[in-house]
Image: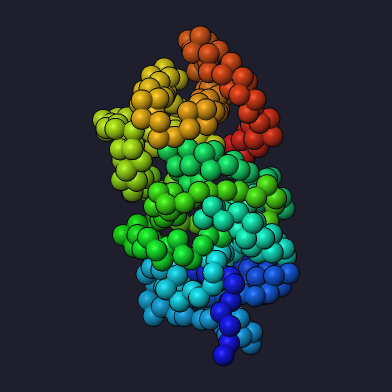
């Protein structure tokens, strides 16, 4: 009788012929080989199926959706088929470093209280490296990111299958956008998070990704989806917002990803004080980590306003937040440098 694999790698693919082979090869060539690779072809109309069928590896489990559904549906199909102790997420256009699974399995085996584990990533495009993607390492540092957005670099994540099985966690198929955000929010209720401070993934920057397309061309739909998730997070702080505050919260969440428009620092200051006060009373998020996150968001917004000559009347507010930012020793110059370079392009 064939033994069950230790890791089930799940991959949703839709019209992925350009980079799919690199993604598949990076999994099949892992130093950790006790795995299965579940690929769900979500109704592709290009050469995706031909590429998948060109492999004779017994590690590959192939499923084809007759029509294109969405990534949530495809991942749920893969989750239902997974037999491994651990489930690793892989996107069809990224590249896992050769020792990714070995490092992550070892970490999970030695940290039984951790249910979800990601890593750092090297971002690249067709021109080469775009920089390094890093997130906090600790449970508290990662979970406070849920206040605004996804806490992980999604295709770097591995998690325990027992977690999603015991608590009936799955991707919400009603979400066309931000499905990962909702999934990690659900997981956060039942387990601890962690990140390995190693670059175990090469993350491909592509403008055709659903989330980036939504951010640029379907802003309102993305906002409506995010609002429904944000309302769940903010309810943990016994906080209800006006429509204007929800819109501000969403725009703040986009800071460091894209620059949509000018954000009034006075409005940010008032709103952040409100968040901090409610969390101080409820203690849902770690207060120190929340301070650090809001300081970072505020400082980046202030630098953006400075670039557009909107900073003159906010010197006092800026000084207070920047002093806090420096106090927590999280002034990441490489991050700010990357931010400015990306927005000059």
State the residue at coordinates (34%, 46%).
229
| Coloring scheme used | rainbow
Q: What is the x, y in percent for residue 239?
A: 30, 31
Answer above or below: position of 205 versus 276. Answer: below
Tell me residue 331's x, y (percent): 64, 27
- The residue lying toward the viewer, choosing from 157 and 227, is 157
Q: Is residue 118 left or right of residue 279?
A: right
Q: Is residue 219 above or below residue 27?
A: above
- Residue at 55 percent across and 12 percent down: it is 319
Please state which of residues 194 and 233 is positioned toward the viewer in this rendering: 194
Relative vertical location of residue 225 with respect to residue 281 in this rendering, above or below? below
Q: Residue sitting at 56 percent across and 19 percent down?
A: 324
Q: Residue at x 31, y 59 (%)?
A: 174
Label tally: 0
Q: Where in the figure is residue 198, as x and y percent of width and height?
A: 70, 50
341 versus 80 height, above or below: above
- Image quadrant occupied by the N terminus: bottom right
Residue 316 visible within the image = yes
x and y percentages locating residue 219 in the rendered image: 38, 44
Tell which of 124 and 95 is nearer to you: 95
On the question of residue 341 being in view, the answer is no
């Amino acid at each position: 009788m064939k033994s069950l694999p230790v890791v089930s790698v799940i991959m949703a693919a839709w019209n992925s012929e350009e980079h799919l082979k690199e993604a598949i090869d990076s999994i099949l060539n892992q130093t950790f080989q006790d795995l299965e690779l579940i690929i769900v072809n979500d109704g592709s109309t290009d050469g995706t199926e031909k590429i998948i069928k060109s492999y004779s590896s017994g590690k590959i489990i192939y499923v084809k959706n007759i029509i294109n559904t969405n990534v949530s549906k495809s991942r749920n199909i893969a989750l239902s088929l997974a037999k491994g102790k651990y489930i690793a997420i892989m996107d069809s256009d990224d590249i896992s470093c050769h020792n990714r699974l070995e490092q992550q399995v070892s970490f999970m085996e030695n940290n039984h209280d951790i249910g979800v584990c990601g890593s750092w990533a090297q971002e690249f495009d067709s021109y080469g490296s775009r920089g390094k993607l890093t997130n906090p390492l600790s449970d508290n540092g990662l979970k406070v990111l849920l206040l605004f957005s996804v806490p992980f670099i999604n295709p770097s994540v591995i998690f325990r299958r027992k977690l999603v099985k015991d608590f009936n966690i799955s991707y919400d198929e009603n979400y066309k956008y931000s499905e990962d955000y909702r999934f990690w929010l659900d997981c956060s209720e039942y387990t601890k998070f962690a990140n390995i401070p190693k670059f175990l993934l090469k993350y491909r920057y592509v403008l055709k990704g659903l989330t980036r397309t939504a951010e640029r061309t379907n802003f309102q739909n993305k906002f409506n989806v995010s609002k429904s998730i944000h309302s769940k997070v903010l309810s943990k702080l016994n906080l209800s917002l006006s429509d204007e505050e929800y819109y501000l919260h969403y725009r703040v969440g986009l800071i460091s990803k894209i620059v949509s428009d000018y954000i009034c620092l006075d409005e940010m200051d008032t709103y952040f004080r409100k968040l901090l006060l409610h969390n101080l009373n409820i203690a849902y998020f770690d207060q120190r980590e929340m301070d650090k996150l809001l300081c970072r968001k505020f400082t980046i917004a202030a630098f953006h306003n400075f670039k557009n000559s909107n900073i003159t009347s906010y010197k006092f507010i800026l000084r207070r937040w920047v002093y806090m930012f420096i106090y927590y020793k999280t002034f990441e110059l490489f991050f700010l440098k990357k931010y400015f370079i990306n927005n000059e392009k």
